[in-house]
Image (cartoon, rainbow, N blue to C red):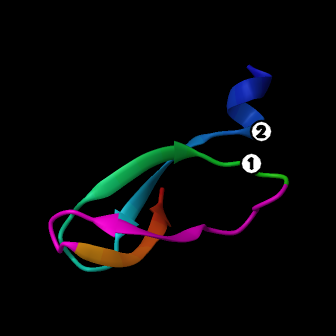
Amino acid sequence: MARNDIRPIIKLKSTAGTGYTYVTRKNRRNDPDRMVIRKFDPVARRHVDFREDR
């Protein structure tokens, strides 16, 4: 139970509008705000920002 409370599973959705998502875990204590990570979007074929989608 504690594992899900501290490190929940989140979806990272592409800001390019392609609908592509990554699934990962995050540490709520270190990153309480929504995450923004720059990753590769294979649909857009370039690196774009991925924002946390709840």
Res 53 label = none
Secondary structure that dominates the magenta span: loop
- The reply to whether the magenta stretch includes residue 39 is yes
Residue 44 image-quadrant placement: bottom left
Q: Residues within 10 Å of mark 1 (few under 14, many from 20)?
A: some
Q: Residue at x 36, y 64 (%)?
A: 13
Q: Position of residue 40 (x, y in %)?
A: 34, 66
Three-letter amino acid code of the residue under disc 2: Ile
Gap between marks 1 and 2 measured at Cα = 6 Å
**x 74%, y 48%: residue:** 27
Asked which quadrant contains residue 32, the reply is bottom right
**Is 9 positioned to the left or the right of 33 in the image?**
left
Q: Are marks 1 and 2 in contact (CB under 8 Å)?
A: yes
Q: Disc 2 marks which residue? A: 6
* Residue linked to disc 1: 27
- Crowd band around label 2 with a 10 angstrom C-alpha radius: few (<14), some (14–19), many (20+): some
Q: Residue furthest right?
A: 29
Q: Which residues are magenta?
A: 30-45
Q: Is residue 25 magenta?
A: no
For numbered disc 2, what is the local secondary structure?
Answer: helix
Q: Earlier in the sequence, mark 1 or mark 2?
A: 2
Q: Position of residue 47 (x, y in %)?
A: 35, 76
Q: Residue at 70% x, 69% y: name it.
A: 33
**Where is residue 1, by image quadrant?**
top right
Total residue callouts: 2
Between 28 and 24, which is closer to the camera in this rendering? Answer: 24
Q: Is residue 49 above or below residue 54?
A: below
Question: Is 1 placed above or below 25 here?
Answer: above
